[in-house]
Image (cartoon, rainbow, N blue to C red):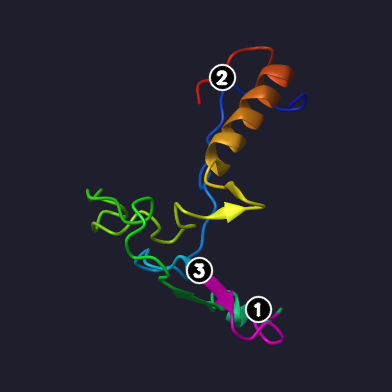
Amino acid sequence: MEQVPFDGLWTDMNEVSNFCNDGGTGQVCTNTNPAHCPTLDLATQTTCCLSCETVDADDKRDFPPYKINNDASRQNLGHKTLPMSAQHFDVDANDWGLDECVRTTTEYYFRAHSRPCM
């Protein structure tokens, strides 16, 4: 920041992603072949190594009674990301984007000495 002046930043993809959860119905995803997927081969960098399944179709966090226009195609909330019911060490984990925003705001304020608009 000291070398190039700037007055803002754009944080894109500030949510955890899981492109294997296409359609958003996967609540539990596992790598069925961890010894061979992923590889370091550039040709396979977009190969999905996860198999995702629905374990509780009645979970209102993953399947609320309303639909949003997720991905501009009315996909479920978990489409290409973690399910809303995801937990990490027995704590709800979908505050990823909020945590990144808080950390980015703090660092921006510390370095630029101004309030950012996030």
Q: Left or right: where does residue 72 sit relative to residue 31?
A: left
Location of residue 68 in the rendering, given as x and y in whole percent from the top left corner = 25, 48
Neighbourhood count class around disc 3 (C-alpha, 10 Å): few under 14, some 14–19, many 20 upward: some
SS assignment at label 1? loop
Q: Residue furthest right?
A: 2
Image quarter of residue 106: top right
Q: Is residue 114 above or below residue 107?
A: above
- Secondary structure at numbered mark 3: strand
Q: Could you tell me what secondary structure mostly forms the magenta stretch? A: loop
Q: Earlier in the sequence, mark 2 or mark 1?
A: 1
* Cα gap from disc 3 to disc 2, whole angstroms: 37 Å
The answer for how far apart the CA atoms under marks 3 and 1 are is: 18 Å
User: Which corner quadrant of the image does residue 42 belong to?
Assistant: bottom right
| Res. 11 visible in picture | no
Disc sitting over residue 116 in the figure: 2
Mark 3 or 1: the one toward you: 3
Span highlighted in magenta in the image: 29-39
- Say which of 3 and 36 sits in front: 36
Q: Nearer the viewer, residue 59 or 1?
A: 59
The magenta stretch spans residue 34: yes
